[in-house]
Image (tube, grey):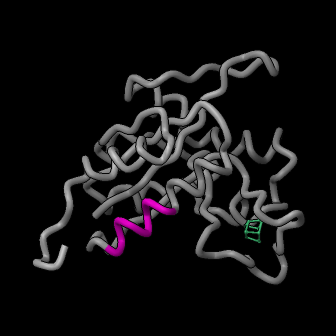
């Protein structure tokens, strides 16, 4: 847009599905729930804890995330049944589109640890800061509660035959 007006958030839900997402939905950031237990699941249960810059303890804390969410008016929840790396690329592309269109605070959150590099450069700093974004859960967002409240599917994955559902979030303002 060249006249200073912003594109509708609906245009980004349409772009998300056109790029391969199963669905995308506009939420209020107050419908994005944070919870203390989430990062404990990263710390005691995930082999990427402390090994990826997109993961705890490097990712934003629960308190930082809540404060950040409360600085936005719009969030877009994006659903993909597969491929968390592709979903991260998709939401980062949307973040860039939104930023360039005038949403100067646009910020993307992905799903799962970043595996763009074989070994994450935790000491030296990220090699691809334009592409790496933390997952929602890495920032203390209760993805299960957020997703179910939004009416999207998510279940505990018990084995490789279970349906998989990944989610990313685009914050807009
Ligand atoms: S892009 Fe590479 S260095 Fe950056 S967080 Fe991902 S794996 Fe780590």
Residue for point 60% across, 62% down: 133
Q: Main secondary structure of the magenta part?
A: helix
Residue for point 87% across, 47% down: 47
Relative image position of residue 83 (x, y in whole percent): 67, 41
Relative image position of residue 76 (x, y in whole percent): 37, 46
Quick check: can you spot residue 142? Answer: yes
Residue for point 59% across, 59% down: 61
Q: How many labels were placed on the picture?
A: 0
Residue range corresponding to the magenta coloring: 93-100
Magenta stretch holds residue 99? yes
Quick check: can you spot residue 63? Answer: no
Quadrant location of the C terminus in the rendered image: bottom left
Q: Nearer the viewer, residue 3 or 139?
A: 3
The answer to whether residue 173 is left or right of residue 58 is left
Task: Please state the quadrant of the image where ligand 1 appears.
Answer: bottom right
Q: Residue furthest front?
A: 18
Q: Residue furthest bottom?
A: 124
Relative image position of residue 116 (x, y in whole percent): 76, 62
Q: Nearer the viewer, residue 47 or 66?
A: 47
Residue for point 56% across, 48% down: 136
The answer to whether residue 4 is left or right of residue 100 is left
The answer to whether residue 67 is left or right of residue 74 is right
Quadrant location of the N terminus in the rendered image: bottom left
Q: Nearer the viewer, residue 124 or 164?
A: 164
Magenta stretch holds residue 19? no
Q: Is residue 7 above or below residue 27?
A: below
Q: Is residue 43 above or below residue 82?
A: below
Relative image position of residue 111 (x, y in whole percent): 62, 46
């Amino acid at each position: 847009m060249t006249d200073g007006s912003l594109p509708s958030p609906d245009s980004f839900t349409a772009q998300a599905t056109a790029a391969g997402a199963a669905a995308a939905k506009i939420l209020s950031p107050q419908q994005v729930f944070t919870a203390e237990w989430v990062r404990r699941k990263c710390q005691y249960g995930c082999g990427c804890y402390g090994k990826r810059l997109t993961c705890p303890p490097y990712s934003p804390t629960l308190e930082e995330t809540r404060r950040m969410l409360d600085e936005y008016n719009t969030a877009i929840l994006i659903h993909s049944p597969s491929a968390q790396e592709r979903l991260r690329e998709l939401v980062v592309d949307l973040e860039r589109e939104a930023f360039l269109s005038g949403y100067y605070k646009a910020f993307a959150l992905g799903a799962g640890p970043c595996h763009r590099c074989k070994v994450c450069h935790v000491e030296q700093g990220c090699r691809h800061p334009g592409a790496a974004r933390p997952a929602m859960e890495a920032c203390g967002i209760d993805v299960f509660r957020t997703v179910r409240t939004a009416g999207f599917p998510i279940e505990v994955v018990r084995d490789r035959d279970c349906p998989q559902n990944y989610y990313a979030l685009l914050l807009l303002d």
